[in-house]
Image (cartoon, grey):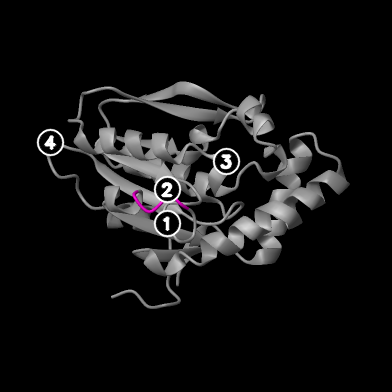
Amino acid sequence: MSTAREVLSVRDLARRVPAAHAPGRLLLGLAGPPGAGKSTLARRLCAELTGAGRVAVVAPMDGYHLRNDVLRARNAVARKGEPDTFDAAGFVADLRLLRRSRIGEPVPWPLFDRAVDEPTPAGVIVRDEDVVLVEGNYLLLTDAQAPGWAEVRPLLDACWYLDSPRAVLTERLLARHLRGGRSPEQAMVKVTDSDLRNAELVAASRGRADLVLTGCGAGYRIG
């Protein structure tokens, strides 16, 4: 029996991933605020599952960013990353397709290219994988929090929430925006005016997760 303060390795977490229900795939959501380390956890968990003989793939939510020309037309470039700057309907439709598809049936999934700041259609093809790690901020939101997102959670077999202290989020997000070419002043405005507000919205969905984790060194603490 796990205790509230137990720290798990990625291998421990991989053992908690249930078996897929044949003939379909297992969809495990990895939610949490921007900068919490979801992408890193997804990659590590995918590698651990693959090493243990399962066939896994990461399907990030980021590929459903609206394109920059659409955001410019909506005067929403500065808010990029907020719930209404994603194609939530397209994300839900593709989750349904993953849910319906048998293993071996190809399902194209978009990725997000940070180098050009745009989504890439069919960046990965989900085909033979029995575990799909669906990673993103808004997997647990209700329609009251952001219209269009409530349909996501019922399509996932389980959803884990990765948390991180606000100071850590701020540091990571600033570094991310600086790497992306923003000036220190621009990066700070993006973090304080957009990213951290998104983090507060996502934090309100934490209670709907099946498991809450916080990074702790190379491991993850429960609770």
What are the residue bounds of the magenta stretch?
Answer: 147-151
Residue 54 to residue 140: above or below = above
Most common secondary structure along the magenta stretch: loop
Asked whether, in this view, residue 169 is left or right of residue 121, the answer is: right
N-terminal label among 2 and 4: 4
Q: From the top left corner, tell me how far across and down residue 132 is, in percent.
A: 33, 39
Query: Which label belongs to residue 143?
Result: 1
Q: Earlier in the sequence, mark 2 or mark 3?
A: 3
The x, y position of residue 84, in whole percent, is: 55, 45
Q: Is residue 214 above or below residue 89?
A: below
Question: Which residue has dot 4 on it?
Answer: 23
Q: Is residue 158 left or right of residue 32?
A: left
The kind of residue tagged 4 is Pro
CA–CA distance in space, label 2 to label 4: 28 Å
Mark closer to the chain start, 4 or 1: 4
Q: Residue 107's quadrant in the figure?
A: top left
Picture residue at 40% right of the left edge, 34% below the top? 90
Mark 3 residue element? helix
Q: Earlier in the sequence, mark 3 or mark 4?
A: 4
